């Protein structure tokens, strides 16, 4: 793939300290709370799937901005906005003016989060600009849901120009982080095939039939470590979300899940490649969009 508009050396001349500054703030945030790494990775994903990687997810509600923060996938769930604010302020300080876009901050913070949790690194393509609009409706329609089965997931990713390998590799982002009870309640109470019964009862202990909607469970056994346990879990029918287990349920993605479950190197390499591909969804470049001064509002 050619990334004509983005380049990995975009800030080398205009602000050589930009990337090290982002890394420093991310490392600090992840040191304070390991879960933040997963949260920052997810922000980039939820940004890119809604009209491209343009930092639209960061815009607060106004009379003219239909904030994505209140969409189904993000409401009381997306987090890490304060870390992005802190990165933006430190980066603008070191650069002397606002030259680094909020969209690029999201892309770099996602990579640095993965690295901080012992995952692979990759060269982030840079030069995205920030949107002047947001769309809660598009967020509701385009961010995949935890209830999707395999055909729906494949369609959802295909709409973004991502294939089945990208789907499996990027779902592996769930090697990090937690999910709220409301997102997996149906699976642990109502599904019988394709779920390990002991696993289901263990999860029920912290996720009652009613209430406790925001109680957390880890998406794999090591939520602060980038490893292949997410995939071994799927092979043993212990995927937390329906959409996780869908990747290993007799469909065309089974083989790749099996490969990743025993080969961290292959998974890491494919994950990095798919992250670059996802980061290149419909960026605003050149004189499109703007470089926001405050990531939460348009200039």
Image (cartoon, grey):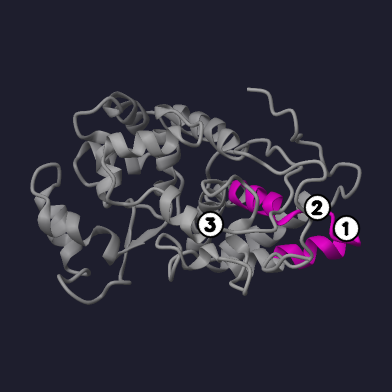
Q: Is residue 116 above or below residue 211?
A: above
Quadrant for residue 167, please give it: top left
Residue situated in front as seen by the camera: 284 or 207: 284
Label 2, on which residue? 18
Q: From the top left corner, tell me how far across and down residue 235 is, in percent.
A: 23, 36
- Horizontal side of 134 relative to 222 (left or right) equals right
Disc 3: CA contacts within 10 A as few (<14), some (14-19) or many (>=20)? many
Would you say 170 lies left or right of 220 here?
right
| Residue drawn 37% across the image and 52% down it | 222
Quarter of the image with the C terminus in it = bottom right
- Residue at coordinates 51% horizontally, 46% vertically from top-left? 49
- 197 vs 296, left or right, is left
As measured in the structure, the alpha-carbon distance from the residue carrying label 1 to the one carrying label 3 is: 24 Å
Q: Secondary structure at mark 2?
A: helix
**SS category of the residue bearing label 1:** helix
Find the distance from the CA under tag 2 to the CA under tag 3: 19 Å
x 35%, y 39%: residue: 153
**Disc 3: which residue:** 37
Q: Is residue 34 visible?
A: no
Is residue 201 something one can see in this rendering?
Answer: yes
Viewer-proximal residue among 63 and 260: 63
Q: Earlier in the sequence, mark 1 or mark 3?
A: 3
Q: At which x and y percent is residue 55? A: 64, 55
Q: Which residue is mark 1?
A: 95
Rendering coords of residue 248 (x, y %): 24, 34
């Amino acid at each position: 793939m050619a990334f004509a508009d983005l380049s990995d050396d975009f800030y080398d001349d205009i602000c050589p300290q930009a990337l090290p500054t982002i890394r420093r703030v991310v490392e600090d945030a992840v040191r304070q709370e390991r879960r933040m790494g997963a949260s920052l990775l997810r922000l980039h994903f939820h940004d890119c799937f809604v009209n491209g990687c343009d930092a639209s997810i960061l815009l607060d509600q106004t009379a003219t901005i239909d904030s994505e923060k209140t969409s189904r996938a993000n409401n009381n769930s997306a987090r890490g906005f304060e870390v992005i604010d802190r990165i933006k302020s430190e980066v603008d300080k070191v650069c002397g003016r606002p030259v680094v876009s909020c969209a690029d901050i999201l892309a770099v913070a996602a990579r640095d989060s993965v690295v901080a949790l012992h995952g692979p690194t990759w060269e982030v393509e840079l030069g995205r600009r920030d949107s002047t609009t947001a769309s809660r409706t598009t967020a509701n329609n385009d961010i995949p849901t935890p209830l999707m089965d395999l055909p729906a997931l494949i369609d959802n990713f295909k709409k973004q120009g991502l294939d089945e390998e990208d789907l499996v590799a990027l779902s592996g982002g769930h090697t990090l982080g937690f999910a709220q009870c409301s997102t997996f309640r149906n699976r642990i109470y109502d599904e019988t095939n394709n779920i390990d019964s002991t696993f289901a009862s263990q999860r029920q202990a912290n996720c009652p039939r009613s209430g406790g909607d925001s109680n957390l469970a880890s998406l794999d056994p090591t939520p602060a470590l980038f490893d292949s346990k997410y995939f071994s879990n799927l092979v043993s029918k212990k995927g937390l979300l329906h959409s996780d287990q869908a990747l290993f349920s007799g469909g065309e993605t089974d083989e790749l899940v099996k490969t990743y479950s025993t080969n961290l190197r292959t998974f890491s390499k494919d994950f990095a490649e798919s992250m670059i591909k996802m980061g290149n969804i419909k960026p605003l470049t050149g004189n499109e969009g703007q470089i926001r001064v405050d990531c939460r509002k348009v200039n």
